[in-house]
Each structure stands twice: as structure tokens, then as C-alpha cells.
Image (cartoon, grey):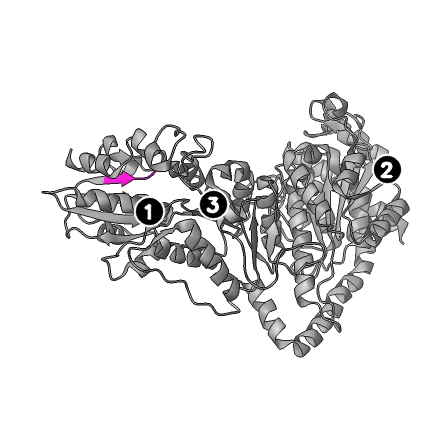
Amino acid sequence: MDTKGIAAVAKSIRSLSIDAIQKAKSGHPGLPLGCAELAAVLYGEVLKHNPADSKWADRDRFVLSAGHGSMLLYSVLYLSGYKVTIDDIKNFRQVGSVCAGHPEYGWTDGVENTSGPLGQGIALAVGMAMAESMLAAKYNTKNHKIVDHYTYALCGEGCLEEGVSSEACSFAGHNKLGKLIVFYDQNKISIDGSTNITFTEDIGKRYEAYGWQVLKGDMYNVKGLLKLIEKAKKCSDKPTLIMLKSVIGKFAPKQGTPAVHGEPLGEADVAETKKNLGINTEEFFYVDPDALRYFNEKKSGFEKNEADWNEEFKAWAEENPELAKQWKASFEGTADGEAKDPEYETGASVATRTASGDMINAMGLKYSYLVGGSADLKGSNKSGMKCDGGTYTPENRGGRSIEYGIREFGMASEALGMVTHGGIRPFVATYLVFSDYMRPSIRLASIMKQPVIYDLTHDSIYVGEDGPTHQPIEQLSSLRAIPGVQVIRPGDAEETVAAWHMAMESKDHPVVLSLTRQNVPVYAKESASWKEDIMKGGYVVKAGSENPDVTIVATGSEVCMALEAAEKVSGKTVRVVSVMDKNLFEAQSEEFQTKVLGESSRVIIAEAGCATGWEGWVTDKKDLFTIDRFGESGPGKKVAEALGFTADKLAELINA
């Protein structure tokens, strides 16, 4: 081991970090100063990676969960040879810079995940480790091991305080994810002071109770770090937490205090820190020549890592052509199997959650890399996978059905980690109202442009007896408000088939499927082009006339309500339109929208949720036939009657 080179890398990480943060007049110097040795050891001695190809499939993954310490990552990416330049670092936290305030997936070469919201990085790392284990079980053969890598994460106290890390780490321990190694930067400092004011539990015992191996060491003992990592790798049936005592802002005059956490050191303290590091105070963005020498000498080894794997992969693909086809499809997001869509007769009564369950299993046959599960609601969500594979367990890594337990936030974040890893397409299921527990992860998935599928059932007051806590009101509008999230609410079983195709075809955005608990009739579609039009968000269910007096725009279960109301109206022509995807429909041309909506002078919106977002569709707010209050406990139809949300009341509104 080249200890001189590692020391030079650590010094350079500290130098680049404090100067970049000072120049930006913004940032978090504490973590880069405190964890520089760990980054140097990981990128120089531990990670199986190749900076020349940041997307190599069998690379080790490193997740910076404590994303505020982003300059640690940018500095070591630059030094080790990724496509991050010294000019990028000098432009830290500026508009358009690849060195954003927090690491951004898809924006910066070598960054494996967007991080910033504390705790979510650990949960993503759990998902990545799951993906590795699934792919290894599916593709490795007796003669060739083409999936064999580790997932590493660096977190701080803040990550471990957030509840999502508890959910995810409990899940990881239960599932014995032995190729997950998390480093805990144990500096005992938070923004408001010592962590002793809020965080005094025994972290080691807590993680041992989760089923983790817990190791302890010193952040600045380089040889000790390597020994700890080797010990972690030898434990194949437990994830490992390596607790490293550290000093936040090490070498700064105010080291070990909250003052070095979240703001520039200041010019005087930068100069003093450089003196402590043995750097000329007049030199900015200093890089120790030994750091560049060290990584230059490592370059051939990094390239050999990938070259050796490419040879192994080539031999494996020649021996296993069918598996090779599945591998290609899974990383490209294309179908690798065949399945017939379920069919439903007009007039049949089918809950869209049931039709969704039918489609999950059809899609499971068509896409061998589709996996999924629910937050302890598999039977209720109708989300059970019946494809070959069974349930994912430590004994059955090839299982495609995942038991997440009652951990909605962790579930969503783990799915995001799986899809970000590559080779796996996950869906997760729960009740629509509990999307509130998942919302931060859904938002992060959209920022990262990752196609997680959220199968959310029990989508309205028709949930019934469980009452207001379980009856969604504002959730549809709030999910539609997240930029990039596709929210699809099918009205019947046939629309649900289309909805799943739309979801599986998404490549760069998350998809929410909003599904009924109650049975709804499969209705006749008058438009001959409905299967094409629905892919644009909406279509004509009942035309009424070319120029109807009233157009009812409905979503989900309210489409059949609208059809029933239209039959109760005389003297007016009524068109019924199903808008399965509001945002997508609004993005279409004016010509298409007019074709679907008709030339009606009056539009009525019918949706069992709040009116927010629909206001621009109507000329009079009284034509928003929505629910803008919490529900009631009772049978679904009785609740609707109590709230005045019935076909009769809708017909009265049409006639008004």
C-alpha cells in the first residue's frame, strides 16, 4: 500500500474542498476535512471501478448518503480520473456546474445517486445491494461469475437519525445483505451542537439488533481502515456498519465544533487550515503531485478490472445466449418474453386493483427483470407476483416477489436504489393515502429521472369503513404537482391494461398508478381510436355529439359515475371523457384536446379528490364536482351519499 500516495490524496481532497467552498461562499467543509482518508482509501485501494468508464456494470457502488459533504466526492472523482475537471471544482455550487451543491445522479460522472435528504442514501444503497444479489442469482453460472460487487455508503449522524434509514437497515439486516458496507462518520456534531443534545442511543447495539455486523475504528488509521473493510467482506450473511471516530473539520482552527459543518471557513481560517496541512497559504486549489502520481499508477489496474470482466462476460455470453439476451433487455428496458394481455368483457365488474394484479403477472412474463412487492398489503393491493421465482429471501435471491413489511418510505427508497443500480425494474405497492409516507422518495426518483412504478390502491372515499385516515383526498393533486411524476388513474379494467403498458414503457420518470378498491364496470368505448388516444392521456368514452352541450371530464371510478349521470339527463347532449393522465393530456396539442373534449361551452370535472389543479379546466368553479373535505367512516356508497358525491347529484349539476 502506498501510504504516501494516500496521504497526498487526503491532503488534496482537503485543499480542494476548502477552496471550492470558500470561492462559492457556500458549502459544507466539515465532512470533506473529516473523512478525506476514507475517500482516498476507497477510491485508491478498495473500490472495483474504472474511472474511464463510470457505467461499467460490475463496478462497486459508492453512495454518499451525507450528500452535503459533496466536495469530498467531487475532489476524489477529479483526482482518480473521472470526468470532473479542476475548472468544474472551481465552479462549485454555480448554475450549470457539474459540481452541484449536493451530488446529482446523471449530472456528474461517477456520482451514483442524488443525495441531500438525509437517510435516503442509505436506503438507496440497500436497494443497490438487493439488485446485486438478485442479478447474481439470476446470471452467475458454475463457470462464470459476472455479477460480484459491493455497495458502500458513507453516512453521518443525521442519516442515522432519519427514520428511513431505520426502515431500510432493519430490512437489510433481515435479508442478510452481506455485500453492503456502510461507514458511519462518528464525529458527534450536528448543526445545533453536539449530538449529545438529541442522539445518545447505543448505535452499535441498535445495528446488532437489526442483524448487522458492527465494527469500530479510527477514521485516520489508514491500515486499520483496510483491515476493517476486509473483515466486513468476510461476513457474507450480514451487512456491516463500520463506526469510525472522526473529527469534523479536521485541521481547521474550529475543528470538532458545529462552526465547521455548514458554511465556509472564512479566509483567515482557510489560511490557518492550509498551514496545518503544510500547504502554501497563497496557493489555491492545491493538488499534491503525489496524489496525481498515485492515481496515475493505479490507472492500469482500474482498466484491467473492467477488461478482465469484459473477457469473463464475453465467455459467459457465448455459453449462455438466452441469459445474455435477458441481460441486454434488462439493462435496456425492453421486453424479453411474451405474454397476452388479460381481456375483460363489457359489463364485467372488476376493481382496477384486480386488473392491475392481472397485469403485474402478465408483465412479469414479458419482462423477466420486473420485481416488486408491497408494504404488508400484497393481498389487499392484489400485487402478488405469481411468476417463477417465488419470494425474495436470503435463501432465495432469485425471488421476484418482495416482502417489504410495513416500511413504506424504506420500500420506495430501496426500489429507487434497485432501478438506479440497473438490470432490475421494480414496482412497490401500498394504499394511495400512504403515498404521503413515500413522497420524499417519489420526489427524489423524479429528480433522478428513474422509472420506479408505484402501485397505489384504495384510491378514494370508496375505501369506506376505514374512514378519513384511509380515504385519499389531496393525494392525487399533490402527486401530480411533483414535476416529472406521471400519475395514471384508469377508469376500468381495460384502461388498467393500457396504464401498465404506459408504466413499463417509461424510461426517465416515475409512474403512479391510482387504483380502485371497489369493483367498477367495464364500459363500452364509442371512440374507435380510444386505444391510441388513451396513450396521450385521455379519450372519448361517450361522444354525445360533435358539439355537446356539456363535456364531463372524469378520472378513475368517476368515469362510470359520469356515464350513469349522462343517462339521467334529458334535453342536453353530454359527452363523457376519461382523462387517465391529466398532465399528459394537458401536454397534447390544442387540436387533439379539442378533438377529445369537443366544442362544448361547458366542461364539468368529476374526480373523487380535491379540486386543486383542475381550476383552469372550467369557467365556473361550481363545475368542479370534487371532494374538498375529509371523508367519513361507513360503507363506500353510503359515504358518497353523505358527501353528495353521486350520479344523481352530478346529473343535477349538469342540469343546473
Q: Which mark is residue 278?
A: 2
Can you identify the residue that label 1 sits on?
Answer: 586
In space, the residues marked 3 and 1 are separated at their CA atoms by 23 Å
What residue is shown at x 71% (from left), y 46% (from top)?
Answer: 174
Dot 1 surroundings within 10 Å: few (below 14), some, or many (20 or more)?
some
User: Residue 217, position in %: x, y?
Assistant: 87, 39
Marks 2, 1: nearer the viewer: 1
Marks 3, 1: nearer the viewer: 3
Q: Amino acid at mark 3?
A: Leu
In space, the residues marked 2 and 1 are separated at their CA atoms by 60 Å
Residue projecting furthest to the bottom: 318
Local secondary structure at mark 1? helix
Q: Amino acid at mark 2?
A: Gly
Dot 2 surroundings within 10 Å: few (below 14), some, or many (20 or more)?
few
Can you identify the residue that label 3 sits on?
Answer: 456
User: Residue 3, position in %: x, y?
Assistant: 89, 49
Q: Main secondary structure of the magenta part?
A: strand
In the image, is residue 303 above or below residue 645? below
Considering only order in the chain, which callout, 3 or 2, is on the residue closer to the N terminus?
Answer: 2
Local secondary structure at mark 3? strand
* Side (left or right) of 565 relative to 188: left
Q: Amino acid at mark 1?
A: Glu
Question: In this picture, which residue range is highlighted in magenta?
Answer: 604-608
What residue is shown at x 19% (from left), y 44% (from top)?
Answer: 566
In space, the residues marked 2 and 3 are separated at their CA atoms by 57 Å
